[in-house]
Image: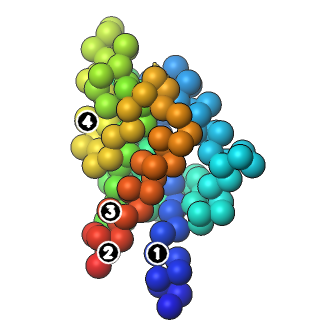
């Protein structure tokens, strides 16, 4: 019973890999009263060791590449990576510019992609719900 009740709770570790912070502003809105993700049992955590899921923004900068890989390695399986925004999906304005990579979600092999520049909070919530369902499937 308790397993079913808490099955959809999510501990989310967020990684900023060269974002302009537009995506972060929309993610912050998820914690505001209008969306209040805590009512879904979701929380943002500071350590990958506590996380079920990694959200990632930005095209992936050189400076973040190693840290992002280490964060993913430190997260217990099964873990789901969600690419947030066009940059992370590999289709953004900054992808391939200067030292920017091909998309942080591409590089970390994201299972869920939430498109938009930036994506709306509603789209983000749907993406996180899809990630929770995927985690359920991987846990069963
Ligand atoms: S997708 Fe748009 S809002 Fe998000 S980091 Fe890229 S440029 Fe900024």
Give the label, 3 or 4, closer to the camera: 3
Secondary structure under the numbered disc 4 in the rendered image: helix
Secondary structure under the numbered disc 1 in the rendered image: loop
Q: Nearer the viewer, residue 119 or 63?
A: 119
Distance in Å between CA atoms under marks 4 and 1: 28 Å
Residue found at the very far right of the displayed protein: 33
Give the label, 4 or 1, closer to the camera: 1
Nearer-N-terminus badge (2/4): 4
Name the residue rendered at 38%, 46% in the picture. Answer: 82
Q: Residues within 10 Å of mark 3 (few under 14, many from 20)?
A: some
Residue 107 tag number: 4
Nearer-N-terminus badge (3/4): 4
Tally of numbered tags: 4
Q: Residues within 10 Å of mark 1 (few under 14, many from 20)?
A: some
Distance in Å between CA atoms under marks 1 and 3: 11 Å
Nearer-N-terminus badge (2/1): 1
Q: Which residue is mark 1?
A: 7
Quarter of the image that includes the C terminus:
bottom left
Q: Nearer the viewer, residue 63 or 4?
A: 4
Query: CB under 8 Å between callouts 2 and 1?
Result: yes
Give the label, 2 or 3, closer to the camera: 3
Q: Which residue is mark 3?
A: 134
Give the label, 2 or 4, closer to the camera: 2
Name the residue rendered at 71%, 46% in the picture. Answer: 34
Examine the rendering and report whether any part of residue 135 can be seen: yes
Q: Residues within 10 Å of mark 2 (few under 14, many from 20)?
A: few
Nearer-N-terminus badge (4/1): 1
Distance in Å between CA atoms under marks 2 and 3: 9 Å
Q: Residues within 10 Å of mark 4 (few under 14, many from 20)?
A: some
């Amino acid at each position: 019973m308790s397993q079913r009740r808490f099955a959809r709770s999510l501990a989310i570790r967020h990684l900023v890999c060269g974002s302009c912070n537009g995506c972060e502003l929309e993610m912050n809105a998820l914690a505001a009263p209008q969306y209040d993700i805590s009512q879904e049992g979701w929380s943002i955590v500071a350590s990958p060791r506590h996380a079920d899921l990694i959200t990632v923004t930005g095209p992936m900068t050189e400076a973040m590449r190693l840290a992002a890989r280490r964060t993913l390695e430190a997260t217990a399986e099964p873990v789901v990576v969600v690419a947030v925004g066009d940059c992370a999906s590999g289709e953004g304005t900054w992808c391939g510019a200067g030292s920017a990579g091909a998309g942080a979600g591409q590089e970390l092999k994201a299972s869920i992609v939430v498109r938009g520049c930036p994506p709306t909070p509603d789209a983000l919530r749907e993406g996180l719900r899809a990630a929770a369902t995927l985690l359920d499937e991987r846990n069963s």
